Image (cartoon, grey):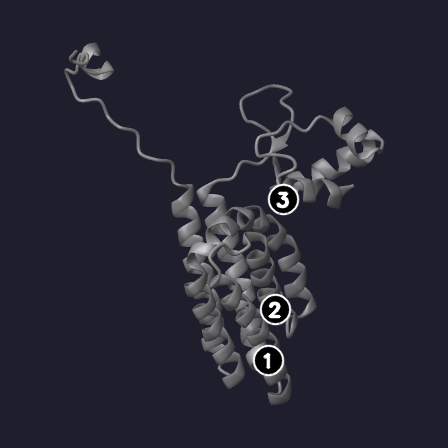
Amino acid sequence: MYRALRDAIIYGRLAPGARLIEDQLAIRFRVSRTPVRDAIQRLQQEGYVVTPAGFRHARPVVAPLTQADAEELCSLAGLLEGFAAAAAARLPTHLRLDLAGELVALNDTMRILGDRPDPSRDRLHDLDAAFHHACTLAAAGPRLLALLEVVKPQAERYNQLYANMLPKRISATVAEHDAIIRCIRAGDAEGARLAVETNYGHGTSQLTTAMTPPAKTRRQPGASSRSRLGAPRER
């Protein structure tokens, strides 16, 4: 039940701000209320669910998507994956070269797809995720993987938004991936770490900028109601 409810939140089937009503969720997922309640409590501990402040007996809701949350989660994911990339760069030469070959294949596919007039957003997102997963899985230890298991799914809520932007920055993304590959192939652990963090940093910056609400147009002091509505047309 926990994973089913978590995935519904991550992939937008339960929208930010949606109220989580145990009876309705139990019917929807065909379970009793007890596993629903347990899942909601766990998701609340992990930050997927919040209870609105200032209201007595308020029902929990899906956590909103915010710039501050995006920066924190994506930065943490970048730090953790950067640590994993540094470990990958310390692998024995034959393992580093095998990994580099796998990463090149994924990145070249992204490059080719990105050159198309209307590349698939979902396909690019999947290739980007596969690139980072392969880079991480190559040398990450159990504790690091456990930390990523907590952070990455939460960041995925924002990655769904980022996927909409990926076709527009595909050239930069591919170039940043090339830098990661070069460092891993050369055994440059510090370079690999910085390259991953740079890749995440640029993506996060564009994401949070895109999340910035448009500035409201201020009314000029002394403007009349007529001027706000516009002058009448000449006939």
Which residue does the numbered mark 3 point to in the structure image? 10
Q: Against 50, is 132 above or below?
A: below
x then y, percent, for residue 95: 64, 84
Which is more N-terminal, label 3 or label 2? 3
Q: Are marks 2 and 1 in contact (CB under 8 Å)?
A: no
At x 53%, y 79%, the residue is 184
Which residue does the numbered mark 2 point to in the structure image? 136
Q: What's the distance in space between the residues labelled 2 and 1, CA to CA?
A: 15 Å
- From the viewer's perspective, tell me whether residue 17 is left or right of residue 188: right
Residue 114 marker: none
Residue 101 marker: 1
Q: Name the residue type under label 1.
A: Gly
Q: What's the distance in space between the residues labelled 2 and 3, CA to CA?
A: 21 Å
- From the viewer's perspective, tell me whether residue 21 is left or right of residue 63: right
At x 38%, y 40%, the residue is 212
Which is more N-terminal, label 1 or label 2? 1
Local crowd size for mark 1, using a 10 Å CA cut-off: few (<14), some (14–19), many (≥20): some
x then y, percent, for residue 9: 64, 40
Q: Against 107, is 49 above or below?
A: above
At numbered mark 3, what does the secondary structure look like: helix, strand or loop?
A: helix
At x 75%, y 25%, the residue is 24
Q: Quadrant of residue 46?
A: top right
Q: Name the residue type under label 3.
A: Ile
